[in-house]
Amino acid sequence: MIIIGFYYNLWRIQNADTEMVFQEFIYGFLLLLFLIFLGFSINKDFKKYKISKSFKSYIPSVIGFLILISFGINALILCLRDSSSVVIQASYDGGYNGAWFEFREDGTYKFVDHAGIGADITRGNYEIKDSLITLDKNKIGNVIVSNKLAIRDENYGDSKKVKLLYQIDEKHSVIKRDFKFFIHEEVEDLEKS
């Protein structure tokens, strides 16, 4: 139980900013395996208690329950990172690949670079002044090559005005004009859609 509990928590923390296909099945399998061992431990401790009448017999079961509680604490702490409301949400759809930003009220952002079977998540802080957003990182993966982003209004399609988010250089010139993020007027959680 201790080994499974240790690795479960370690892998959840190490992989908190990556997503892979079947990742949750692996975590579910480890949790099920842990619960099976916990069940055996409780049964064994109960039999020991019948013989010895000492509450010390339940020490392995108590340790198991503490490890189980640590799973919940771990999940709660990881979930709290995204508890602030999203104020700007922008996404790029590259067909099989995609990426999106979530800029939050508390001055943090979440950038997700999705590549079909998995995703890399980068978190950091940002500052916004007028229509310019400055990130705390100069480069994020192979997608973001500048720490400066600009919100621009442009005509798109049927002369419909849309807000776009571009990467810009120090002179405020657009970098990679074809790689633009569409800003969503209605903020929603893209991970759940």
Image (cartoon, rainbow, N blue to C red):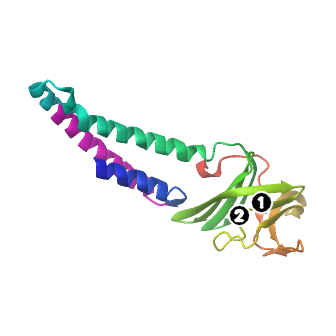
* 117 up-or-down from 26: above or below: below
Instruction: Evaluate if marks 1 and 2 touch, with contact meaning CB atoms under 8 Å apart.
Output: yes
How far is the residue under mark 1 from the one under mark 2?
6 Å
Can residue 25 be seen here?
A: no
Q: Is residue 26 left or right of residue 100?
A: left
What residue span does the magenta drawing correspond to?
20-45
Residue type (three-letter) at the residue carrying disc 2? Tyr
* Residue occupying the point 24% across, 35% down: 59
Q: Position of residue 120 (x, y in %)?
A: 57, 63
Task: Determine which residue is flagged by label 1.
Answer: 182
**Mark closer to the chain start, 1 or 2:** 2
Q: Position of residue 138 (x, y in %)?
A: 72, 70
* Residue occupying the point 49% across, 44% down: 75
- Label 1 environment density (alpha carbons within 10 Å; few <14, some 14–19, many ≥20): many
In this view, the residue in front, 179 or 45, is 45
- Label 2 environment density (alpha carbons within 10 Å; few <14, some 14–19, many ≥20): some
Q: Position of residue 51 (x, y in %)?
A: 9, 27
Task: Determine which residue is flagged by label 2.
Answer: 92
Can residue 40 be seen here?
A: yes
Q: Is residue 28 left or right of residue 41?
A: right
Determine which quarter of the picture holds residue 140.
Answer: bottom right
Q: Position of residue 39 (x, y in %)?
A: 24, 37
Q: Does the segment drawn in magenta span residue 29?
A: yes
* Residue occupying the point 47% across, 45% down: 74
* Residue occupying the point 36% across, 51% down: 6
Q: Is residue 136 left or right of residue 96?
A: right
Main SS of the magenta segment?
Answer: helix
Residue type (three-letter) at the residue carrying disc 1? Phe
Q: Does the segment drawn in magenta span residue 5?
A: no
